[in-house]
Amino acid sequence: DAGVTQSPTHLIKTRGQQVTLRCSPKSGHDTVSWYQQALGQGPQFIFQYYEEEERQRGNFPDRFSGHQFPNYSSELNVNALLLGDSALYLCASSPYTGVRGNEKLFFGSGTQLSVL
Amino acid sequence: GDSVTQMEGPVTLSEEAFLTINCTYTATGYPSLFWYVQYPGEGLQLLLKATKADDKGSNKGFEATYRKETTSFHLEKGSVQVSDSAVYFCALMNRDDKIIFGKGTRLHILP
């Protein structure tokens, strides 16, 4: 079992650019969540995808958008990058159970994004 | 809003010492509570959880008890090892099924 895989592992961008991060969920999982972890902070919830739709969203601006594909993999897109977007971006997958599914989150190792 | 507060680190202990990392929460209703661990260069791993008051979660020698009266979920281990060095995150799942994390506590264990 490959677990949750994310790519790339590291990325450097400049202000104003756009970035796309990718995630493949753990086998058997159909729900994908994205988190932003700034240096020295806990992960902050960005949004969650199930059945190719955004189901929940945290307090992040519209510059942050996502997509889920029929094979359950997901992308996180960030437009008009700001210096403050520099962070570790974590993807987590879980099986959809209708209720309390997030009790079974499995995290990937993350993508470290640096915005210069 | 819902939140998690945990003791600031870093915490430095000698091998075989007793560990406590404090965690308190604020939430409406009856959240589920978690401890996650993050080893260097890796993502978060679920260490243990408790879903209702007075439940005790345990794993790998770590324990935490859901205390509703004090809104706490302190992490303990009787004898730490060098391999326990990592960042530990306390978290809750609220009634909207959103996971809210604390800021994390870095633990250093000296041989």
Image: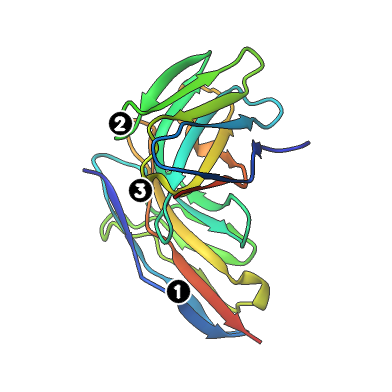
Mark 1–mark 2 contact, CB under 8 Å? no
Is residue B91 shown left or right of residue A106?
left
Real-space CA distance between mark 1 and mark 2, rounded to the nearest whole angstrom? 37 Å
Q: Residue at x 67, y 72 (%)?
A: B83
Q: Residue at x 63, y 26 (%)?
A: A29
Residue that badge 1 annotates: B20
Real-space CA distance between mark 3 and mark 1, rounded to the nearest whole angstrom? 33 Å
Q: Helix, strand, or loop for circle 1? A: strand
- Disc 1 marks which amino acid? Thr
Q: Is residue A19 visible?
A: yes
Residue that badge 3 annotates: A84
Share a chain, discs 3 and 1?
Answer: no
Real-space CA distance between mark 3 and mark 2, rounded to the nearest whole angstrom? 13 Å
Q: Which mark lies nearer to you, 1 or 2?
A: 2
Is residue A84 shown left or right of residue A6?
left
Q: Chain of mark 1?
A: B
- Disc 3 marks which amino acid? Gly
**Which is more toward the observer, A99 or A23?**
A23
Q: Is residue B52 visible?
A: no
Q: Chain of mark 2?
A: A
Q: Report the quarter where the C terminus of chain B lies.
A: bottom right
Residue that badge 2 annotates: A61
Q: Helix, strand, or loop for circle 3? A: helix
Q: Position of residue A48 (x, y in %)?
A: 45, 27
